[in-house]
Image (tube, grey):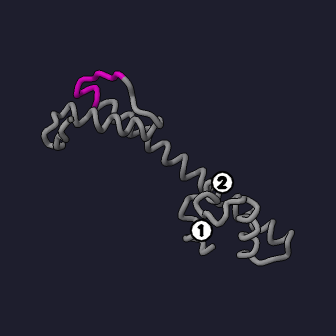
Amino acid sequence: MTEFVAWEDLSEKEQLETIYSDAFKDVHGFRPRGFDMTVNELKIALDELQDEIEFQIKESEAAEKVAIERFHSIVTETMEICNCDKPTAVKYLIDAENVYGDWEHFCFNYGLPFSFPKIQGV
């Protein structure tokens, strides 16, 4: 059985390799295979991954903003079509998605942040 090694017992290279592997997975969805870099190369690669992560965060925030605007438009349209108030329109939309009251699934389907219903009081 392999024993757990404390973080401080790892070499600088091993620590950077661990951080690189985690950051790479955050960006690409899978861990890198067969990478063999020096400490300096790992630091450069981590800087590049940080830039990619920041870009993805900005893209995600912009997409969520568009999704929220789109959702508000859909709610307004539903209110007009059904001649109902906002909570009823949202209930109709949730029912139409067949998510059985699963707020996170509903938000995922609409590209909304998972905290959206709580923030909006829906």
Camera-side residue: 14 or 1? 1
Quarter-wise, where is residue 88 in the image? bottom right
The secondary structure type at the circle numbered 2 is: helix
At label 2, the amino acid type is Asn
x 43%, y 41%: residue: 26
Where residue 79 sits: x, y (%)? 80, 72
At label 1, the amino acid type is Pro
Where residue 109 sits: x, y (%)? 66, 54
Quarter-wise, where is residue 118 in the image? bottom right
Where residue 65 sits: x, y (%)? 60, 57
Q: Which residue is mark 2?
A: 109
Using the numbered discs, state the Cα–Cα distance from disc 1 to disc 2 in whole angstroms: 13 Å
Judge from the rendering whether residue 30 lies leftward or rightward of residue 109; answer left or right. Answer: left
Quarter-wise, where is residue 102 in the image? bottom right
Residue 33's disc number: none
x 21%, y 35%: residue: 1
Where residue 87 sits: x, y (%)? 71, 76
Camera-side residue: 3 or 114? 3
Mark 1 Cα-neighbour bin, 10 Å: few <14, some 14–19, many ≥20 = some
Q: Which residue is mark 1?
A: 117
Asked if the magenta segment contains residue 36, the reply would be: yes
In magenta, the rendered stretch is 34-42
Counting labels gives 2
User: Which numbered disc flags the more N-terminal residue, 1 or 2?
Assistant: 2
Judge from the rendering whether residue 16 lies leftward or rightward of residue 103; answer left or right. Answer: left
- Name of the residue lying farthest toward the left: 9
Asked if the magenta segment contains residue 21, the reply would be: no
